[in-house]
Amino acid sequence: MADIHVMTGGAPKEVLSVLTPLFEQQTGHTVHFSYIVITAMQQKLAAGEQPDMVLMPVPAIDARVKDGILRGDARAALGTVRVALIVRAGAAAPDISTMDDFRQAVLAAKSVVHPDPAATPSGAHLGKMWESLGMADAIKPKLTFRNALDGGAEFVRSGAAEIGLYPLSEVIHEQGVTVVGLIPPEVQLNTVYGAAVLTANAAPEPAIAFVQFLADPANAAHWRDGGFEPAASR
């Protein structure tokens, strides 16, 4: 039986907490996770850190396959996650059903929190979104950067921020907050998450088995429950 060391972003954390015990029970392997924001993960991989496998957005996997860090033949797409708006549980939920409604909800909020643009794909997307909407100057004084892995939902739960914007999978089961809904499609980010095994993994079979288990259609309901939509296998 093997120890499998996995480096992953925060988006799949809820799903992994459900699926990993099932995999361990079936196989006898033990899975160890290091949760880390995507920018830092890319830096660690480039610097030579060698977990057995990674979970990260597919474009990042593609780049690491190209530079030889990840295997192109031991990977799978797991699901698509989109950005949602959250408020404190019990607070009035703003209307975000149209772009105008969404814009007004953000402008009316006294405080906003979302991931750091320098640390995560969703943060980078949101930073560019404010610029494209011409809202960057208006939102800057009330905007705080806090990654989900660093307590972003807690910022909303405590009332420190009136609204939060995070990948749905990172907040869907958080206590003390309410998911109002997905932000409008015109400004939405569709992040396809995947898993891949490192080229340097000298005994890759257990990690490959875990990749296959995570991507098994029999587990699709767990991904949906965790805030992901199905993604075609790759």
Image (cartoon, grey):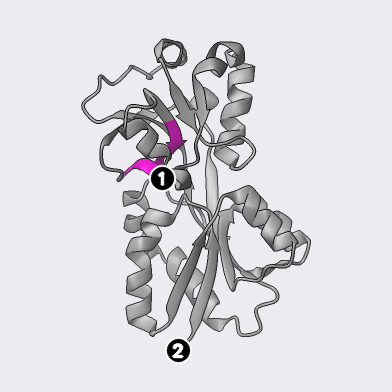
Tell me the CA gap for discs 1 and 2. Answer: 31 Å
Q: Which residues are magenta?
A: 165-172
Please rate how many residues cluster around mark 2, counting C-alpha atoms within 10 Å: few if below 14, some from 14 to 19, many from 20.
few
Q: Is residue 145 magenta?
A: no
- The amino acid sitting under disc 1 is Glu
- Residue visible at 46% across and 29% down in the picture: 113
Residue 104, percent from left and from top: 43, 10
Of residue 133 and residue 127, the one placed in the foreground of this image is 127
Q: Is residue 171 magenta?
A: yes
- Residue visible at 74% across and 60% down in the picture: 46
Outermost residue toward the bottom in this view: 1
| Numbered disc 2: secondary structure | loop
- The amino acid sitting under disc 2 is Met
Quadrant hosting residue 30: bottom left
Above or below — where is 2 with respect to 90? Answer: below
Which label number is shown at residue 170?
1
Of residue 173 and residue 35, the one placed in the foreground of this image is 35
- Residue visible at 55% across and 54% down in the picture: 36
The residue labelled by disc 2 is 1
Residue 71, percent from left and from top: 68, 70
In the picture, which quadrant includes the N terminus? bottom left
